[in-house]
Image: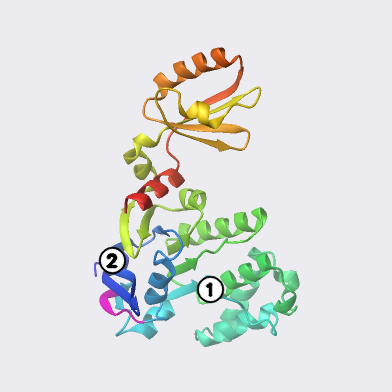
Amino acid sequence: MTTENAVEVSNLTKHFGEVVAVDHISFQVKKGELFGFLGPNAAGKTTTIRMLTGVIKPDEGTASILSYDILREGLKTKQLMGIVPEMANAYVDLSAWNNLMLIGELYGVPKRQRQERASKLLKEFGLYERRKNLVKGFSRGMKQKLLLCMALINEPQILFLDEPTSGLDVESQRLIKDMIREFNKNGKTVFLTTHNMEEANQLCDRIAIINHGKIATIDSPERLRLRSSGLQSIEVSFDRAVSVDELSKVHGVKEAKKTGDKIRLYVDEPGVVLDKLVDFARSKRVKIISINTLGPTLEDVFLKLVKES
């Protein structure tokens, strides 16, 4: 493993019976990088994280975390990482404070340091006033914030997050994303799995897309969009209802979809289609209220790559 990489994976493979959950994948995550790992359900995301964090053993291949082999030096790798699994919970019959004290002690953090870190983290996540309350009375958002505090109590060098904002309200999502950015800004590495394309776009330096256990592509969000120039679109709304089927027949339109009160048209040449839309509006005696040309979103790219793979 090179000193520039926080994670290095080579031919990592995992079977569950006859199913190949992860199929000989290889990739690297640079130190200080915020790396996104995206894919549809059952694509192999969570299985990969479980192998990298030592929860399950790979059947083939190797992986290293900050130069330490995940199999031969598993204890050392665990000491360097913080983990928020997708299906995780704090100890509900303990207070928030005692959860942090317990996890800090398990990581070998000296008492005074874990008390100082716990106070700082709980204040940053807005949980300090509830530190003595049992976790069983916490909302989902509060529990997720506490899990992040627990993952950060040992001041890890790399943070593994499996769907950290799933099911949370907008305010809680924003706070957690801000804390992920802050952690990463200090030179620490983040390995993030998410279904949320916009979240990956906002947070990640690079993303890997996995499907059917194989890596479809790895690149920055912006370069992925540039590579998918054929996914340009036009978003248009009219002063009264217009059929999606009618618009899909406009010359140059490859696909039409209703999105709220607008219709999105996927095109290769926006300029040509814009002229045709004006002609369409005149012929149907409708007025165009708004019209915008859009580059491909990360979600468009994701769906295209998943379909191709």
Q: 262 left or right of 126?
A: left
Cβ–Cβ under 8 Å for marks 2 and 1 = no
Residue 1 rendering spot, x and y as whole percentages: 24, 70
Which residue matches tag 2? 25
Q: Does 34 appear above or below 239? A: below
Q: Looking at this view, is 75 or 3 the one in front?
A: 75
226 to the left or right of 298: left
Residue at screen point 54% across, 64% down: 164
The image position of residue 115, as x and y in percent, is 62, 79
Q: Provide the residue span drawn in magenta.
A: 57-63
Q: Residue 231: where, in percent of width, then height?
A: 39, 36
Left or right of 47 on screen, residue 27:
left
Please name the residue shown 31% across and 60% down the image: 215
Amino acid at the residue labelled 1: Ala
Mark 1 lies on residue:
151
Note whether residue 4 is visible: no
Asked if residue 61 lies in the magenta stretch, the reply is yes
Specify the quadrant of the image occupied by residue 144. bottom right
Which is more foreground, mark 2 or mark 1?
Answer: 2
Residue 293 vs 284, above or below: the answer is: below
Question: 166 or 249, which lies in front?
Answer: 249
Mark 2 neighbour class, 10 Å CA radius: few under 14, some 14 to 19, many 20 or more? some
Q: Dot 1 surroundings within 10 Å: few (below 14), some, or many (20 or more)?
A: many
What residue lies at 26% left-to-right and 75% top-to-bottom? 62
